[in-house]
Image: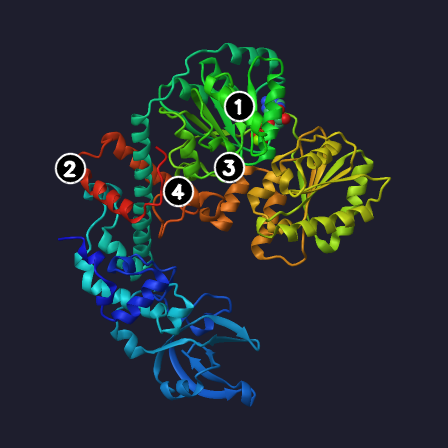
């Protein structure tokens, strides 16, 4: 048979028709039978168990009772009437309460008749109630198909207004399954299903919508989630194979004069073991003849810049140019300065190109790039521009990956006929499998060790009402000779408001820390670069005690003597941003402190974020928490980084183990049959095609 039942227009489904079809399309984007079948419930409610009245506790989730209403009673003031039904099952009495539709209820339900009641117990007037319960006669209940676990579906206000609620969707699913269940075409090959003991698709779909029991629901979920993650991985791994085959990598085989000179004569410290390991991984890639496509994860301050520099020296030793692209001008400048400093007297031509590079200089840089005279270029998005052409670009380093999209990376690739090696660096660690999924087919290296001697930053959260204590603490620290950052949130949509907050904050600080005894610098995005620089320099040189700044310092200055960071309105930041900010301190010999200031009222999620920051300095733990709190869809940049298919049932954050498993299986399949040519794998090829045609906003970087 054909796949046609999935494609059948939803308006033909009994119970739908043209009007409802229009609504379903507009509100839920459901246009076909297949769309509806894949409109999965957000929860299932246990209707297999009957509770006894005496066991009912407030706070239980929805429960089911069997019994009779013994009498009805009206209560409350005339304008706030409520109807109470005294319901009993011989183990006790419980009150059913209605505030609306009282007359209708009174008429429809009879005393001393057997009912099945379903509702959520709550405490009211120190009695346990079921407010607006579902009531169904036992007779009716027994006559319909038992679902065991009842599926609940999200709907919208508009759908509800048009009487399409969760119950109606359930009914439609029922009609659909009745009509189509024997025409659902399998989407996984039989051998794979057998091997992994997976439900067939029809059974899985039936049991996701109408599970008989918990076990079947579990099996259905497992099959559907696995399938989703499996095809996702298969797709990614296949593209990887293609890339590796299609593009050869420049082979950097020279051991290297410059690298050696740097390592032996200029490196101011020992590499950490993690740095050594990562460098080895990179060298292996660079010499392999395959194009490197590697993600380097490492916490703030773990020494990624050094790895980038040493990788670039390898490129240079082999006669190739390289570049670093950073997300902001300040960060690019910082890289430029620290790399210049590290290279000290070495004969390497390094230059900086940003939006504010003067025209004459820009022209010179362009020329030097073409002749090959310029060896290492550091800059911002300016590097992507078409006017920037290299003689032979061998290695591209991208810092802070999450701010660049796949498309932007692709433009860098195109600067050569043969794509350069790519090293992507990020300080936002995410679990390995997730990284590989969200960032396409990058290999992952991890620096999981900080340089020796760093003292973990101590973090505390203070509510606005306790600010006076923070001021005392600041004073104490200044008297000990330390310097302090105060950061105000900068949220681009309302730069004016942000600036106002900063200005007010600055005025406040001056009141507590008046000149001439204290000196305060200010830095914000609206200042001219020279002004900004001057103000920063004062702080860097230790001539000011406090620096009041917007988040421009996030990726900016390195001041070892600054041991306190106060983050204002900390509740407005995401976890990864807080983590980045905190990484600005704790770089020197002193114990450092991070103070998270927040308003007195906080959402639960904000509270959890701040608690996480107080609890740990481990970037991976923070990333994990971020994932739990927000889900991967919200992790900065994941949208544009291009997950090829939309996930309907699996969650990248929560199903991480299954993701790993699915990846392993996909790898096995491709190891055995790299081009998916075998007969038994044809269903996979088919399904990949269908999925790709459905979702194609994924621009492959190749
Ligand atoms: P990241 O970019 O990972 O946040 P950086 O590369 O900026 O970290 O390094 C942070 C600081 O640590 C820099 O001042 C750098 O010189 C220093 N550093 C890097 N590696 C080491 C090391 N192995 N030992 C001591 N200090 C190091
Ligand atoms: Mg860095």
Element class at badge 2: helix
In the image, taking residue 135 as reference, residue 186 lies left or right, namely left
Who's the residue at 18% across and 40% down the image? 682
Q: Nearer the viewer, mark 4 or mark 1?
A: 1
Residue at image mark 3: 429
Q: Nearer the viewer, mark 3 or mark 4?
A: 4
The figure's colour scheme reads rainbow
Element class at badge 4: loop
Q: Are marks 2 and 1 in contact (CB under 8 Å)?
A: no
Q: Residues within 10 Å of mark 2 (few under 14, many from 20)?
A: few
Residue at image mark 1: 365
Q: Ligand 2 closer than 8 Å to the CB at disc 4?
A: no
Rendered view: 259 above or below 102: above
Q: Nearer the viewer, residue 522 or 616?
A: 522
Q: Residues within 10 Å of mark 1 (few under 14, many from 20)?
A: many
Q: Residues within 10 Å of mark 4 (few under 14, many from 20)?
A: many
Residue 679 marker: 2
Residue at image mark 4: 642
Rendered view: 219 above or below 254: below
Element class at badge 1: helix
Rendered location of residue 693, percent (x, y): 27, 47
Who's the residue at 30% across and 70% down the image? 20
Residues under labels 2 and 4: Cα distance?
30 Å
Q: Earlier in the sequence, mark 4 or mark 1?
A: 1
> Residue 219, can we see it?
yes
Residues under labels 3 and 4: Cα distance?
18 Å
């Amino acid at each position: 048979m054909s796949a046609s039942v999935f494609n059948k227009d939803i308006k033909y489904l009994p119970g739908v028709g043209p009007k409802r079809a229009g609504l379903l399309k507009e509100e839920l984007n459901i246009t076909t039978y297949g769309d509806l079948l894949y409109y999965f419930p957000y929860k299932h409610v246990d209707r297999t168990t009957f509770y006894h009245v005496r066991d009912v506790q407030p706070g239980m989730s929805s429960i089911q009772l069997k019994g009779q209403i013994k009498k009805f009673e009206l209560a409350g003031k005339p304008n706030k009437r409520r109807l109470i039904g005294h319901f009993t099952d011989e183990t006790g009495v419980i009150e059913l309460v209605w505030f609306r539709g009282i007359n209708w209820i009174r008429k429809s339900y009879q005393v001393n008749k057997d009912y099945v009641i379903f509702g959520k117990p709550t405490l009211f007037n120190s009695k346990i109630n079921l407010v607006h319960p579902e009531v169904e006669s036992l007779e009716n209940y027994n006559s319909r198909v038992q679902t065991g676990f009842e599926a609940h579906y999200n709907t919208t206000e508009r759908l509800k207004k048009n009487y399409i609620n969760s119950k109606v969707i359930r009914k439609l699913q029922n009609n659909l399954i009745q009509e189509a269940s024997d025409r659902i075409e399998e989407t996984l090959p039989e051998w794979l299903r057998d091997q992994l003991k997976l439900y067939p698709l029809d059974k899985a779909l039936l049991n996701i919508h109408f599970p008989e029991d918990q076990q079947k629901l579990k099996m259905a979920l497992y099959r559907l989630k696995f399938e989703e993650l499996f095809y996702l991985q298969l797709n990614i791994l296949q593209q990887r194979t293609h890339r590796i085959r299609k593009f050869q990598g420049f082979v950097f085989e020279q051991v290297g004069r410059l690298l050696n000179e740097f390592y032996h004569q200029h490196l101011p410290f020992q590499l950490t073991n993690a740095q050594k390991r990562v460098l080895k991984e990179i060298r292996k890639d660079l010499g392999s003849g395959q194009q490197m496509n590697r993600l380097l994860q490492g916490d703030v301050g773990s020494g990624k810049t050094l790895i980038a520099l040493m990788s670039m020296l390898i490129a240079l030793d082999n006669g190739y140019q390289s570049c670093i692209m950073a997300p902001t001008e300040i960060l690019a400048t910082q890289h430029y300065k620290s790399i210049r400093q590290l290279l000290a007297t070495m004969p390497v031509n390094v230059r900086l190109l940003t939006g504010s590079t003067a025209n004459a200089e820009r022209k010179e840089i362009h020329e030097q790039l073409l002749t090959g005279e310029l060896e290492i270029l550091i800059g911002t998005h300016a590097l992507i521009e078409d006017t920037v052409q290299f003689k032979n670009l061998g290695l591209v380093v991208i810092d802070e990956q999450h701010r660049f999209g796949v498309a932007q990376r692709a433009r860098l690739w195109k600067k050569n006929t043969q794509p350069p090696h790519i090293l992507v660096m990020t300080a936002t660690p995410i679990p390995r499998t997730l990284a590989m999924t969200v960032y396409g087919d990058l290999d992952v290296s991890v620096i999981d060790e900080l340089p020796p001697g760093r003292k973990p930053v101590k973090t505390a959260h203070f509510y606005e009402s306790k600010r006076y204590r923070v001021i005392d603490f600041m004073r104490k620290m200044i008297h000990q000779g330390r310097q302090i950052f105060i950061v105000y949130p900068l949220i681009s949509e309302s730069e004016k408001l942000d600036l106002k907050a900063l200005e007010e904050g600055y005025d406040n600080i001056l009141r507590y820390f008046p000149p001439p005894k204290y000196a305060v610098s200010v830095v914000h995005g609206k200042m001219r670069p020279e002004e900004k620089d001057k103000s920063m320099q004062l702080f860097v040189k230790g001539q000011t005690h406090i620096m009041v700044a917007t988040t421009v310092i996030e990726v900016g200055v390195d001041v070892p003597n600054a041991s306190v960071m106060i983050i204002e309105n900390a509740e407005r930041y995401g976890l990864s941003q807080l983590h980045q900010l905190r990484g600005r301190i704790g770089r020197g010999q002193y114990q450092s402190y991070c103070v998270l200031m927040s308003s007195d009222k906080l959402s639960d999620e904000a509270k959890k974020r701040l608690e996480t920051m107080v609890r740990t300095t481990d970037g991976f733990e923070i990333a994990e928490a971020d994932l739990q709190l927000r889900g991967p869809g919200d992790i900065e940049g994941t949208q544009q980084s291009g997950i090829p298919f939309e996930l309907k049932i699996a969650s990248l954050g929560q199903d991480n183990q299954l993701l790993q498993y699915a990846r392993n299986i996909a790898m096995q399949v491709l190891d055995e049959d790299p081009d998916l040519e075998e007969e038994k794998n044809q269903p996979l090829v088919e399904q990949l095609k269908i999925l790709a045609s459905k979702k194609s906003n994924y621009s492959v970087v190749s």
